[in-house]
Amino acid sequence: MSETDSTTGLTHRELADLMRKNAGINVDPAALVDNPTTPFEEYGLDSLGLLGIVATLENQFGHPMPQDAERCKTPREFLELVNDTLMKSGA
């Protein structure tokens, strides 16, 4: 995964990479951009896969993600929560 730009936060492309690396799910980043409210379950990402993504982000940034991150249902919800957390932490 590439370095996250602190001005833009976690991108759709990075989320797609995390989905592939942590859950074995190949998703075109454009699909996440074009359909940000499509539930993760429609992509095949379950709660365990999302938990793995959250753990990876916590390790990468050395900062805990909110507990709600693992309960997010859509890419939009997840990216907004994670990026808000990263901006507040200065990561």
Image (spheres, helix red, strand yellow):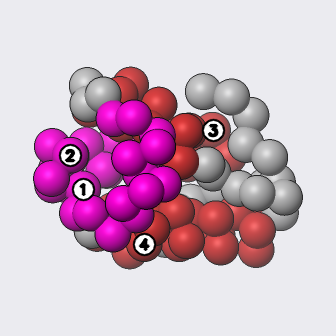
Q: Position of residue 70 (x, y in %)?
A: 33, 62
Compute the Cα span from label 1 to label 4: 10 Å
- N-terminal of the pair, mark 1 or mark 4, is 1
Relative depth, front residue between 57 and 74:
74
- In magenta stretch: residue 38: yes
How many numbered marks are there?
Answer: 4
Residue at the disc numbered 1: 40
Residue at the disc numbered 4: 77
Q: Amino acid at mark 2?
A: Tyr
Q: Amino acid at mark 3?
A: Gln
Q: Is residue 53 left or right of residue 3?
A: left
Q: Position of residue 73 (x, y in %)?
A: 27, 68
- N-terminal of the pair, mark 2 or mark 4, is 2
Residue at the disc numbered 3: 60
Compute the Cα span from label 2 to label 3: 24 Å
Q: Is residue 1 left or right of residue 37?
A: right
Q: Amino acid at mark 1?
A: Phe
Compute the Cα span from label 3 to label 4: 20 Å
The residue tagged with tag 4: helix, strand or loop? helix
Q: Position of residue 25 (x, y in %)?
A: 26, 30
The span shown in magenta is: 27-54
